[in-house]
Image: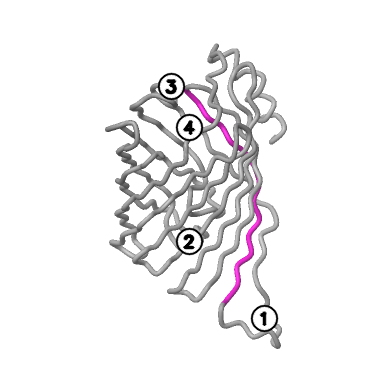
Amino acid sequence: MIKRIFLLVFALGPLLLMAANPGFGTRKYEVTGMVEYNYNKTSRHQANFDIQALMPINQHFEMEAKVQLSTANVYTGALQFRPKFELPAGELFLESNLMYRAIVRNQVADITAAVGVGYRMDYVSVTIGSFSRVIDDWNRSWFSNETYIVEPFNFFYRVEAFCRPQDNNWNLSFMISNIDDYQMERMWQPAFSIGAWYDVTDHWRVCLAAQCKPSGMFHLNATFYSAYLRAGFNYRF
């Protein structure tokens, strides 16, 4: 099934969109700060503070670091590596993610490693891949029979569509996915996101976003959704 989806994206994408190479090339160094408001049935009202730094090494490789601090006593750090390859119609890229979440309120550590392949053009970006998780109790005794939880294989996907070319000074995007920047879990129900940006100057960009995604601890038994609102600024050097 995964192989068929992969072949469909690469075979039909250029024919359906009829776009030339947008020449994404090397992006500028960027720092983004966002403030989130979240409401869900588990922890009610909460706020998150996000910081992201994009570090383009050259035309074919970039790195991204992400940190989130939550009033729900959940702290996340992630590092992403992205090799890129320009094609006659769009850009092929590979993603490797390492993520650590300290869930202080439950004394749990969540470590995730992910690998994916993606393809983007002016108006669309598609990524599919797999991730593994290790969940461990902070208070587990190494001398007991207790063990940690391992999820060796989980499938993830991310599909995002844009109203204007991605290098435009303003845009509106729509995304469906089962992961986000700070959470990779077994989300069988999809998460829905809307994003927008506007370039105030050549360096400053205003960013807005809203998201609706499954709620609950590890999404194991949650059939209800939570709502997120994000607002912040992006600075490009």
Which of discs 3 and 1 lies nearer the camera? The answer is 3
Q: Which residue is mark 4?
A: 160
The residue sitting at 27% across, 33% down in the picture is 200
Quadrant of the image occupied by residue 40: bottom left
Sequence-first disc among 3 and 1: 1
Q: CA distance from mark 2 to mark 3?
A: 31 Å
Q: CA distance from mark 3 to mark 1?
A: 52 Å
Q: CA distance from mark 4 to mark 3?
A: 12 Å
Q: CA distance from mark 2 to mark 4?
A: 23 Å
Q: Which residues are magenta?
A: 123-137
- Judged by its main secondary structure, the magenta piece is strand
> How many other residues sit within 10 Å of disc 3, few (<14), some (14-19) or many (≥20)?
some
What's the mark number on residue 44?
Answer: none
For the residue marked with disc 1, what is the amino acid?
Glu
Which of discs 4 and 3 lies nearer the camera? The answer is 3
Q: How many marks?
A: 4
Q: Which residue is mark 3?
A: 165
State whether residue 65 is above or below residue 142: above
Judged left or right of residue 33, residue 125 is right
Furthest residue to the bottom?
A: 143
For the residue marked with disc 2, what is the amino acid?
Thr
The residue sitting at 53% across, 47% down in the picture is 64
The residue sitting at 55% across, 40% down in the picture is 56
Residue 126: x and y, percent?
Answer: 56, 32
Which of discs 2 and 1 lies nearer the camera? The answer is 2
Furthest residue to the front?
A: 237
Q: CA distance from mark 1 to mark 4?
A: 41 Å
Whether residue 158 is in magenta: the answer is: no
Looking at the rendered structure, the secondary structure element under dot 3 is loop
Circles 2, 1 touching at the beta carbon (< 8 Å): no
Looking at the rendered structure, the secondary structure element under dot 2 is strand
